[in-house]
């Protein structure tokens, strides 16, 4: 039995370690931020931020451009979790978002981008 067959995965979708530049606005403070994703999936993304005002369960606006595709995706996402990376006072946070509002056109463009990334992954040898 292969190791991957022994692992129990709780997530619905595969996470891809792909840096995508994103911009987001937090309604609690009205400020906009820019960063890169740590990973992405069909229904969410993870990134690092220094924003202390972002709260779990809050909804934020996100905009990102898919590398190599030039298409901009806009939508709304819910902050599912936020964790400090280290115990230092000035340490940034890791944040997990779930996409909740996205137009059908943007969703299709994003899913095509993910499929293209999956197709480009090295094939595992049996």
Image (tube, rainbow, N blue to C red):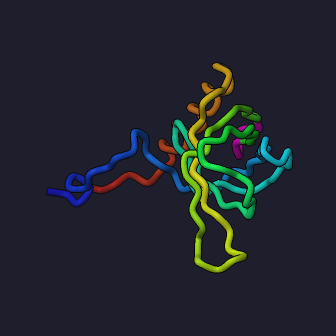
Question: In the image, is 97 to the left or to the right of 75?
Answer: left
Against 80, residue 122 (above or below) is below
Q: Quadrant of the N terminus?
A: bottom left
- Pick whichever, 123 or 105, lies toward us: 105
Magenta-colored segment: predominant secondary structure: loop
Against 105, residue 13 (above or below) is below
**Residue 121 percent coordinates (x, y):** 47, 51
67 inside magenta stretch: yes
Against 19, residue 117 (above or below) is above
| Residue shown at 76% from the left, 35% from the top | 72
Question: In the image, is 111 to the left or to the right of 34?
Answer: left
Image quadrant of residue 18? bottom right
19 inside magenta stretch: no
Q: Quadrant of the C terminus?
A: bottom left
**Residue 119 percent coordinates (x, y):** 48, 42
**Residue 23 percent coordinates (x, y):** 78, 47
Judged from this view, the residue extending furthest toward the top is 104
| Residue shown at 61% from the left, 45% from the top | 79
- Pick whichever, 102 or 111, lies toward us: 102
Against 104, residue 116 (above or below) is below
* Residues shaded magenta: 66-70
| Residue shown at 60% from the left, 25% from the top | 108
- Pick whichever, 110 or 69, lies toward us: 110
């Amino acid at each position: 039995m292969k190791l991957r067959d022994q692992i129990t995965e709780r997530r619905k979708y595969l996470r891809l370690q792909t840096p995508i530049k994103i911009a987001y606005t937090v309604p609690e403070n009205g400020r906009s931020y820019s960063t890169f994703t740590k990973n992405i999936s069909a229904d969410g993304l993870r990134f690092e931020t220094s924003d202390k005002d972002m709260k779990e369960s809050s909804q934020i606006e996100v905009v990102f451009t898919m590398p190599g595709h030039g298409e901009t995706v806009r939508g709304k996402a819910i902050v599912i979790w936020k964790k400090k990376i280290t115990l230092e006072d000035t340490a940034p946070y890791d944040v997990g978002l779930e996409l909740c509002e996205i137009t059908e056109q943007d969703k299709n463009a994003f899913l095509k981008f993910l499929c293209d990334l999956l197709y480009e992954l090295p094939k595992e040898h049996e």
